[in-house]
Image (cartoon, grey):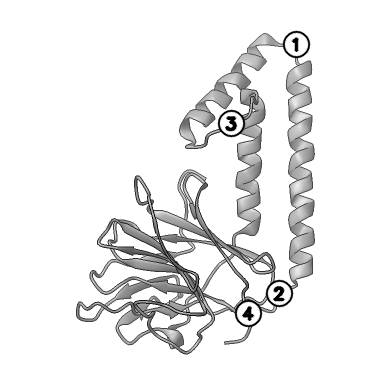
Amino acid sequence: MAPLRQSEASFEVGFYVALAAVVVISVSVILWCICCKDRDTKRLIRGKCINNLQTESFHFNLPLSETLAVLILNALQFVWRILKINVTLDPDTASPSLRVSEYGSQVRFTGERSAEWPSVLGREGFTSGMHYWEVEVGEKGYWVLGVSTHPHEKSIPEKPGEGYWLVRLAQGKICTAVSQSGDQILKLEKICKVWGVYLDHEGGRLSFYNAETRFHIHTLEGSFPGQVYPIFSPGSHDKGPLIINATVKNV
């Protein structure tokens, strides 16, 4: 597997240009709202803002106006779309007990139930840059998401050592952040069905999000030594798939 040969410099320039455009558009709309003298138009905009905010599981601690709040939400959604990449699963890295779909967008367990964590890697490895992908886990009770520096291993150790940064779900309720720094149980009220994974290679951060609400769940910090690969395990307890590059309905 070759490292991803993208132009990270072009990617980052494009990202900041897009972000600047969002800010300019947002400020313009805010000024238009302030200057607008049509009460019916203002009432319509205010109603749309309230409706959008009510459908978003997003909490603001700042005294923002409803209009400004929804504009920021839209800007954030746009930024996520800019960052999102398509991860393709590499069947050559998959455990024999896993089946990868034809186009590399799904993986499921097909063997006999066991305590192992059979895994598969993304086809592209990352040596720099910022990358974000989403995975639908659905109602599965066992799975692992994260990154790895081990391109030749086809299963994740029960107690991963150096070179793994993961979030793991077991028994449908025990969610654990796993790295060489140790394990940490994440106290979540509810396990979300679609997870976002954000890798900041230079910044040494791997963050996990509820992809439907953009709520930050946990961040693992450290130094990534060279090339890392997205890693996935559907567990070995059910036949349900992990769906890579999931489409979030309310985005």
For the N terminus, the image quarter is bottom right
Q: Earlier in the sequence, mark 1 or mark 4?
A: 1
Q: Which of marks 1 and 3 is nearer the N terminus?
A: 1
Which amino acid, mark 1? Lys
Residues packed near mark 4 inside 10 Å, few (<14), some (14 to 19) or many (20 plus): few
**Residue tagged by mark 3?**
61
Q: Earlier in the sequence, mark 3 or mark 2?
A: 2
Q: Earlier in the sequence, mark 4 or mark 3?
A: 3
Q: Which of marks 2 and 4 is nearer the N terminus?
A: 2
Query: In the rendering, which numbered label is found on residue 6?
Result: 2
How far apart are the alpha carbons under marks 3 and 2?
38 Å
Contact, mark 4 vs mark 3 (Cβ under 8 Å): no
| Nearer to me, 153 or 185 | 185
Which amino acid, mark 2? Gln
Contact, mark 1 vs mark 3 (Cβ under 8 Å): no
Which amino acid, mark 3? Asn
Contact, mark 1 vs mark 4 (Cβ under 8 Å): no
**Residue tagged by mark 4?**
225
